[in-house]
Amino acid sequence: MTTMLKLYDYPLSGNCFKVRQLLAWLGVAYEAVPVDFYPGREHKSAAFLANVNPLGQLPVIDDDGFVLRDAQAILVYLASRHDAQHRWYPDDAKLRGQVAMWLAAADEITRTASAARLHDALGYHLDIDACRSGARAVFRVLDDHLAEQASAGLRWLAAAPEPTIADLACFPYVALAGEGGISLDEFPALRNWVWDFRHLPGFIGMSGIFPAGPA
Amino acid sequence: MVARRPWEIHTMNTDPAPYDMPRWHPVARSADLRPGANIVAGFAEGQELALWRSADGTAQAWDNRCPHRSVRFTLGQVVEDRLACAYHGWQYAAGSGQCVSIPAHPAMQAPRNVCAKVFGAVDAAGMLWVNLVAQDTSAAPPSLADAVPAGWHFCRTLTLRADAQKVRDALAQHGFATDAAAGAFRGALEEVRTIALVLDAQPQLTFVHLWTEASPGSDAMKTLRAAARNLRSAIETQG
Amino acid sequence: MPFATDDSNMLDDWLVAGPATSLAGTSEQQPHVTRLLGETLALWTDAHGTPQCRLGTQPLVVQSRYGYLWVCPSGHPARPLFAFPEYTEPGRRTVDCGGIGVAVSGLRVIENFLDMAHFPFVHTDYLGKVPHTEVAPYKVDIDPATNEIWATDCRFWQPRASAAHDSGADVLYKYRVMQPLSAMLYKSSARPGAQDAIALFLQPIDDEHVIAHTMLACFDEVSTDAELIAFQQTIFGQDKPILENHAFKRMPLEGRAETPTRGDTSSVTYRRWLRERGMRFGTRAAA
C-alpha cells in the first residue's frame, strides 16, 4: 500500500511552486507538509537538517520513502515518472540537452533574482547590488534567446512546440523579479514569455503571480 | 544631407516638417498584441503604457494606471472589448477608456467621470505607433506605413541601457541614415540590410526594433542577430 | 532631527520596530539593527531585560508591548499606545506571522487592509469569488475617545474552504484603525460566538517602504503555527504585487487623481482622517 507523495512546502517559495505546478499538471495527488520558513527558519532547524534535507532548503519530496531535494531534480523525476507523453521532459537528445542547459540557468536565477527578493521581502542580509546585476545579466540571456528564436516560431526555452520543465524552472523568479527590485521593463521578450506561461491551461499560480482569472 | 541608398523611400518632400507633427512612437510589434488576449507594457519618453487590442483587433494604448487607486493596468486582463483592472475588477471600454463596470456595485451605473487616459494608437508597417499628444488617429502621417518595406522580416527588439540620442548617434556612425518622417534608420549591420526603428522608452533605456530583408532561418538573419548584440555591447560600454 | 520626515504624526507617535523576539541574545555591544524613518536603529535588552534603543549615540524611547517593540522618535509621544485587550485574553493564541518588506507607502497598505472589494479578484477562492463581488453598505465611525476609525456591519461572501462547487457564506468583519500605520480586523472565529483578531503593524522604513508585521490573536486548537503563518503569508503575498504596482507609491490625499466609489467608505474616511491630522509622510501632493 503506497502512501501519498509528501511535499515539504512553503507558500512564498518559487522553488516549491515549481513542484506544486508540475504535480497539478501531471494530476498527481500529494500531501503538503507546511514548513515555517519565515519567520521560524524551520528549514534550518536541527530536526529538518537531520531528517529531511542536510542542505536546509525547500522543496523536498518524499515519494513513498524515495526522498529527493532540489526543485530541478524533483521536476526531472516527476516528469520522468508520470508524464507518459514525454512533453515536459522530452526524450530527444538535443531537446534534453537544451532542457538541462536551462535548468542550470534556473539555478543562476535562484542565486540572483530569488536572493534579491529574500533581501527585499524577508530582510536577508546579502550583497543586493550583486544579486540585482547578476539577475539582469541572466535575464538578458533569456530575453535575447527568446527574442531571437521567436522568428523561427519558437515560444519556449527549448526548441519544442510546447513548454517543458525548462520553462517551469526558470519562470517563477522571473515573474517575481519586481519583488527583488529588478524591473522587467527592459526585457520585452521575457515579459511576453511570462504572460504566455501564466495563461497556459491549468496554471495555478502562487502568491505574487496571478493566474489568469475569470472577469 | 546624407546620400540616399537605392532602397530608401522618397517621401520626405511630401510630408510636413518633423517638428510640426506630433511624434509617433514605435512601441511594439503589431503581432505581439493578440486581439482580446494579452496586455503588453509599453514605454515612450518615460510614459508608461498598457497596450492591448479589443476583440475586433483595434489597438489600444492607455496610460498604465487605473483611475481608481492608480494600480497598473498591465496586471489586469482583457475581457472582449474591455480592460479589467487586477485590483477590484473595474472594467473600461476600448476606444473611449470609459469605466463601464464596478463589480462592488453590480446594479450601479459606473460614474461618467471615471475614465482611463487614452492615447492615439495606429498599426502601420507591422508596428504599433503611439502618439502621446493627440487622440486623433486620423492625424497619423501616411509615411508611417513606409517605415518598413513590404516583404521585410522582423528580426527582434533590442533593448539598450543608453539614452536614445546616444543610440541614434551610434547608428549614424555605423552609416545608418534616417528618414525623419518615420524616424526609421536605414543601413546595414555586418552587410545585412537593416531598418532600425528607435524608441526613446525611458531615460537610459532605448528600444531598437530591427527589420531586415533577410528571411527567418537564413544565415543573414543569424549574422544580423549576432551583429545586433555586438552593437549593443559597443554602445553600452561607450563612455 | 535626523529622521526622513518632520511630520509629527510619525515623530510623536509610537512606531513599531519589529518583534520583541528580535532582541534575543542582544547586548549593547551586539544589538539588533533595524531601519526606521530613513535611519538605522540599534535595539537590545539591558541587564534588567529592559529594551533599549539608540540612533547613533542618541538614546530613543522604546517599549515592548503586544510582542513588538515600539519606538517614539521624538521622545514626546502625543498619546499612549493603543489598547489591544484581545492580546491577553485567556485561550487566545498569539502568533507573529513575520515582517514582510513592501515597496509602497504604508498608507496604501493600510487602505488595502481595510478593503473588501478586492477579495474576489486578488484573493480568489480564499476570501472571495466571482460573481459574489457586491460590497453591501457598512458603517464607519470615529471613536471620539480614542480618535480611532471603526468600520462595523461589514460582511462579504467567502467560499467554503473545501467546496468543489460554488458554495460559501457571508463572513462578518469589523475593522479598526488605531494609528496611521496600525490597523486591526476582527472576523468570525473557529470558537463559536468569538472573533479572531488580525493585527497589521507597519514599520515605516521611509515614505515608500514599510515592513508589514502581521499578528494573529485567535482561538484555534487545531492548526500548527506553520499552518497559520502559511495562510497569512499566502494572503499577504497575493496583495504584494498589487501594492508594489501603484503608479504613484505615495497616497494622494487631495486632488482628483484617484476616484473612490460607494464601497470605499473605509478608505474615504481613512484619507479624510489623515488629511485632518495633517498627514504628510507617505503622501503625494496634488498634481
Image (spheres, coloured by chain):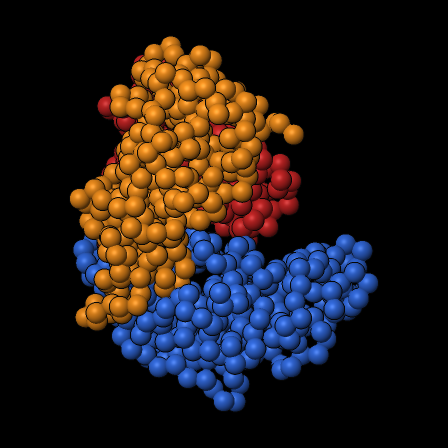
Chain colours: A red, B orange, C blue
* Residue at the outermost front position: B13
A149 vs C213, nearest the viewer: A149
Residue B85 picture quarter: bottom left
* Residue at the outermost bottom position: C145
Residue C126 picture quarter: bottom left
* Residue C134 appears anywhere in the view: no
Is residue C60 shown above or below C233? Answer: below
B227 vs C118, nearest the viewer: B227
Left or right: residue A91 compared with residue C99: left
Residue B182 picture quarter: top left
Left or right: residue A90 compared with residue A208: left
A184 vs C88, nearest the viewer: A184
> Residue B115, position in %: x, y?
31, 61
Is residue B49 shown above or below C146? Answer: above
> Residue A108, position in %: x, y?
52, 30
Q: Which residue is depicted at the point 39% across and 24% down?
A: B195
Q: Which residue is depicted at the point 75% across and 63% down?
A: C55
> Residue A141, position in %: x, y?
48, 26
B190 vs C57, nearest the viewer: B190
